[in-house]
Image: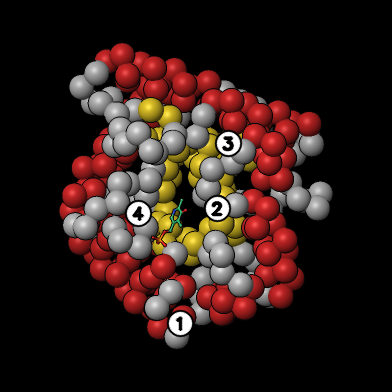
Amino acid sequence: MIADRIAIVQAAIAHACDVAQRPVDSVTLVAVCKTQPVAAILAAAGAGIRHFGENRVEEANPKLVEVNAAFAEPLTWHMIGSIQSRKAKDVVAYGGQRRFGLVHSVDDGDLAARLSRLVMERVAPPLPVLLQVNVSGEASKSGFEAAGWESDADVRQRISDQVRVVAGLPGLMLRGLMTMAPIVDDMEAVRPVFRSLRLLRDHLQQALGQPLPDLSMGMTDDYPVAIEEGATLVRVGRAIFSG
Ligand SMILES: *Cc1c(COP(=O)(O)O)cnc(C)c1O
């Protein structure tokens, strides 16, 4: 049952918060429902989920309209997948309305500028976003390149400059950072990646002089460790929807 799987994930989140001495409401569970049918999403909402993540805007938009119409309470939708530039407009609005409460996957400066421009053209309030950062240096991962930032002053300067430009875009509200950790067997192996993202966030807050409260990190295989390292948003798919 989906409700049982959600209860297990919520208990694991509570335990990780306990270990980290963080309040349990400092972590938002985003149920990643890509490829899931409307019925499964409604079952998850019925079992208490209020935040859903999708990775393809063309799949997400029609589905979220249907789910919103069928569910009595407001739901928050998160865009977590890579966004092609020609689809950026569908992330900013669909059917004349803003649909996504947070975009986690702003992975380069051109996309950020495009999203900001589209928001300004619509005279809409700033779109809340996270910047996707590649801290592990894996070549397969997209995002702002930050591998080695702790030891390399040039990398540190470059990423600070890039983030400062995005923070200044009038159509975006920069809320923090997101990362995709490498896939490994042992979740302890990714702890340094999560820690590096948190420390980079701390550094950027200082450098920019503005709060960056959100850290989106951790998926089914590693969300407890991500919470111990400071995640405020965990993106969990399989642990909720498959089994
Ligand atoms: C699919 C996906 C997730 C969820 O992964 P699970 O391993 O199913 O928990 C998280 N983040 C992104 C960006 C995804 O595409």
Residue under label 1: 3
Label 3 to label 2: alpha-carbon separation: 20 Å
Residue under label 2: 55
Q: Quadrant of the N terminus?
A: bottom left
Mark toward the start of the polypeptide (2 vs 4): 2
Label 3 to label 1: alpha-carbon separation: 34 Å
Quarter holding residue 128? top right
Q: Confirm or deny contact between disc 2 and disc 4 (CB under 8 A).
A: no
Mark in the foreground, 3 or 2:
2
Q: Could you say whether the residue bearing mark 2 is in a helix, strand or loop?
A: loop
User: Looking at the picture, which amino acid does disc 1 mark?
Assistant: Ala
Foreground of the two, 49 or 219: 219
From the viewer's perspective, is residue 183 above or below residue 63?
above
Q: Could you say whether the residue bearing mark 1 is in a helix, strand or loop?
A: helix
Taking the spot 56% from the left edge, 56% from the top edge, the residue there is 54
Q: Quadrant of the C terminus?
A: bottom left
User: Looking at the picture, which amino acid does disc 4 mark?
Assistant: Gly
Q: Residue 173 carries which label?
A: 3
User: Looking at the picture, which amino acid does disc 2 mark?
Assistant: Asn
